[in-house]
Amino acid sequence: MTLPTLQDAIDQAGSPIRLMWKPNAPRWSPPVVPPEFVGWREEQKASYETVALSDLCHHMTDLFIEGPDALRLLSDYSVNNYDDFAIGQAKQCVVVTEEGYLVGDTILTRNGAEKFNLVGVPSSLAWIRHHGATGDYDVSFSLDPDSATRKGGDPVLFRYQLQGPRALQLVEQAFGGPLPKTKFFHSAPVTLGGRTFHALRHGMAGQPGYEFIGQWKDGEFVKQALLEAGESFGLVQVGAWAYATNTLESGWIPIPTPGIYTAPELREYRESLPALSFDGMNALRGSFFSENIEDYYTTPYELGYGRLISFNHDFVGRQALEQARKHTTRERVTLVLDPEEARRVWGADLELRETMLRCRVEADDQVVGMTFDTAPMVLRGTVLSLALIDKKYATPGTEVTFVWGEHPGPGTDPDADLGFDRIKATVQIAPYNEYARTGYRAND
C-alpha cells in the first residue's frame, strides 16, 4: 500500500493553507520532559539568576551524515561558509529553496573529517537527506527521530543544556576544574566519572552555558552528576513549559514555515514527503490569516541570518538571496506588550503558556506584520513576542498593536471583525537580551 504524500494531502485539501490551518490545535510541548518541576516561573528565572538544567534529549531530530561527499552536499544546499570548518565546531546551518525562501535552520556539528550531525526541526533535515539521496553524492544517512515519533527505543544521544550566571561555576565543581577554553559554538571532549562526551559552548536564553552531548548509555550518569554538583549553586531543572520560552530573549524563531508548498519545481520533493511528516502536520493558527501560504514564508535576511550567508560558493538559492538582500522589506523585532493590557487578557499572573501562534501586528489601521513566538517573561513583568514587521515600523520605541485570537480560517474574511483582543506593544530590538546580542561570541 502506497502511503499518501504531502502533495497528495495538499491536493485533497485544495490548497496548502487549507491543509495547514488548524485553529485551536494543541500547543507544542517537548515530549517526555514534564511540564514543570518546581513551577515554570522559578524555572524560567533560574536561567537568569542562578543556573538551569534543560533536558534536550527528546524533542529534536538527529540526522547523521557520513561519506566523502558529505561536506560538498552541505555546501551545495546551505548558505554557510565551510572554509576552515573544524572538527568539533558547530554552525547554525541555514537551508533555502531556489527562490530564497527559508526551509529551516538547524545546528550542524562536524564530528570527523567525513562525519556530520544535523539536529533540530525536521524540515531542513528532510531537505538535505532528499537531495543527498537523489543527487550524485557518496554519502550515507542515519536518522534518529524525536521521542514523539520514534517507534520505540531510546535516543542515540543525550543532550543536557546548562546555562545561567552560575553555570560555569557549577561546571568547575562537577568536573573538578574549568573545562578546556573553547570558542563559542565549538566543543571539546570532556571526561566525567570515566565517561567521555563533548561540551559545546552554547546557550539559548542569552546566558553563558554548555550543552553536554554524548552516547545515551552515559546520559543518566552525567545528568545525576550535574544535579548533585548543582545543589550548592541553586540549580533548577527546567520543564517543558519554561524551556519553550527561553528562545524569546535570544531572538531565535524556532519553527518558521518552510517555503516548500507552492513552487511547481518542488512538486517532486513534496511527493517524497509523507503526508504525516513534520511539514505536513505542523499547524498554522492565530489571528494573522491569509489564503496564500506564501505570506507565511520568510527569508534568512528577515530572520537576522544575513551574517551567516556566504557567497563564496554556489548553493541552491544563491541568486535569489543576492537579490533579496537588496529588497528585504520586513525585519525581526521583539514586541514588548503593555503589562496592564497583557494582564487584562491573561490575568494577573499572566497564565499564558508559550505559543507559536501567528498573530497580527497592526499600526496605522493596517496589518504591518505577524508574530512567531509569544510568552510571558517573569523578570520582565510582561509578555514578549518575536515578530516580523514592515521596516517602516521596526524602529525601537515604535508603538504597534498586538492582536490576540484564533482566526477560523478559510471561509472567513482575513480582515473580519472577530472581536479579538488588542494589546498595545512597543517595538524593541531582537535579540532583546543584551548578552545574546554582545556576549555570545566574546570568546571567539
Image (spheres, rainbow, N blue to C red):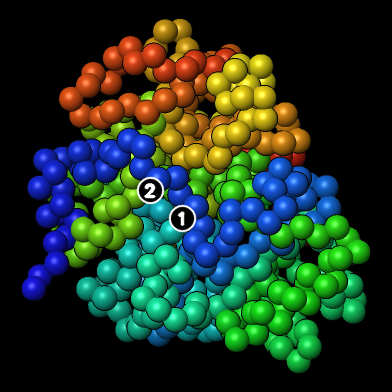
Which residue type carries mark 1? Asp
The correct choice, above or below, for 144 with respect to 322 in the image is below
In the image shown, does 358 or 223 lie closer to the viewer?
Answer: 223
**Residue receiving disc 1:** 105
Which residue type carries mark 2? Leu
Q: Residue at x 50, y 52 (%)?
A: 29
Say which element carries label 2.
Answer: strand
Which of the labelled discs sits on residue 102, or is there none?
Answer: 2
Position of residue 168 in the picture relative to residue 246 (left or right): right
Q: Position of residue 225 (x, y in %)?
A: 78, 77
Query: Which quadrant of the view contains residue 295?
Result: top left
For mark 2, does the 10 Å Cα neighbourhood hold few (<14), some (14 to 19), or many (20 or more) residues? many
Quick check: marks 2 and 1 in contact, CB under 8 Å? yes
Image quadrant for the C terminus? bottom right
Image quadrant for the N terminus? bottom left
Residue 325 seen in this snapshot: yes
Q: Position of residue 365 (x, y in %)?
A: 42, 8
For mark 1, does the 10 Å Cα neighbourhood hold few (<14), some (14 to 19), or many (20 or more) residues? many
Residue 201 seen in this snapshot: no
Q: CA distance from mark 2 to mark 1?
A: 8 Å
Q: Residue at x 85, y 71 (%)?
A: 229
Query: Which quadrant of the view contains residue 396?
Result: top right
Say which element carries label 1.
Answer: strand
Q: Position of residue 2 (x, y in %)?
A: 10, 70
Q: Residue at x 46, y 40 (%)?
A: 356
The correct choice, above or below, for 208 with respect to 13 in the image is below
